[in-house]
Amino acid sequence: MSAFPHPERYQQMQYRRSGRSGLKLPAISLGLWHNFGDSTRVDNSRELLRHAFDRGITHFDLANNYGPPPGSAESNFGRILREDFQGLRDELVISTKAGYTMWDGPYGDWGSRKYLISSLDQSLKRMGLEYVDIFYHHRPDPETPLEETMRALDQVVRQGKALYAAISNYPADKAAEAIAILRDLGTPCLIHQPRYSMFERTPEQGLLDVLGDNGVGCIAFSPLAGGVLTDRYLQGIPQDSRIASGSKFLNENQLTQEKMEKVRQLQAIAQQRGQKLAQMALSWVLRDARVTSVLIGASKTAQIDDAVEMLSQPVLSQDEIDAIHNILV
């Protein structure tokens, strides 16, 4: 069995500064949204985490509700940390979030100080940690004053329960407001986590400008559009695919003829570049210097390898970016 961790892990990865902060993140980060709950064998989760770290992925991204059931991804991650990553905490960036439904009653959802602080306390207990590196508000709350939500983030940083404050799923105007409040409180917003891919380009409509102007990083989730931006569905729906499993996040109705024709055209460009479509999709998101990192999900170590190997492939030329844009419009 090879030594863990791999002694040359840091030579395999690019690290990019998050906005104007002092923190660098790996260009590829591992999200634990899927494949780390109680429905997944813990040995498979362990293999994915160890392999990711061996490839230089130092950032593991969680949320209070990841599972299923909610909370189980954090619990399983905490177990693997204790058993496999002893002595390595200071080489890891661990993030978690609160903002979606976590427990019954009026205090288990959205963005109140009550919910955010108690949720982080529960997350720390599940993971067996004294602090997380990044704590996100997971989505805007339409009813709680934004000042209250941001003050809660400020409070957990000042208490040492989190090193950095962050937001996720905020539209450009709300993100600008949240960033300004955190700056005034003296706890700058480190990073924003939006959904961003070739098929979800909303961040280009003002959000990336807000982040760039304010020195805030960006980490994109679902850069492969739930697996659509791969060769996975070009020949139909595989039995072991997310769609076949009945996932509420991706269903057969989303694979329209128009979308799949675009996927085939994108696949042709990727083949001309000598890479997989998934690799080109990640490279496309990372083409913008304002994007610090892309979050990948993985059920197999080969998917981690593909993502990391993308970093050593040629960057997209302007002609290729233009050709991709012409397909997407």
Image: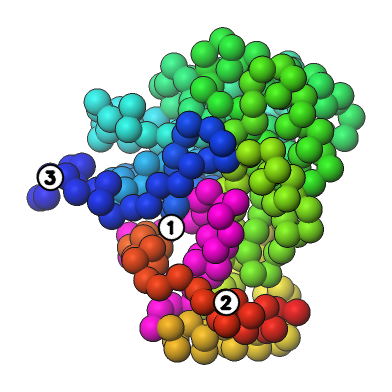
Circle nearer the viewer, 2 or 1:
2
From the viewer's side, name the closer residue of 131 and 248. 131
Element under disc 3: loop
From the viewer's side, name the closer residue of 139 and 78. 139
Picture coordinates of residue 174, whole percent (x, y): 82, 39
Q: Earlier in the sequence, mark 1 or mark 3?
A: 3
Q: Which mark is residue 3?
A: 3
Circle 1 residue: 298
Q: Tell me which segment is drawn in magenta.
A: 274-303
Q: Which mark is residue 144?
A: none
Picture coordinates of residue 41, whole percent (x, y): 37, 49
Hey, what amino acid is under mark 2? Answer: Gln
Circle 2 residue: 318
Picture coordinates of residue 236, whole percent (x, y): 56, 85
Hey, what amino acid is under mark 1? Answer: Ala
On the question of residue 211 being in view, the answer is yes
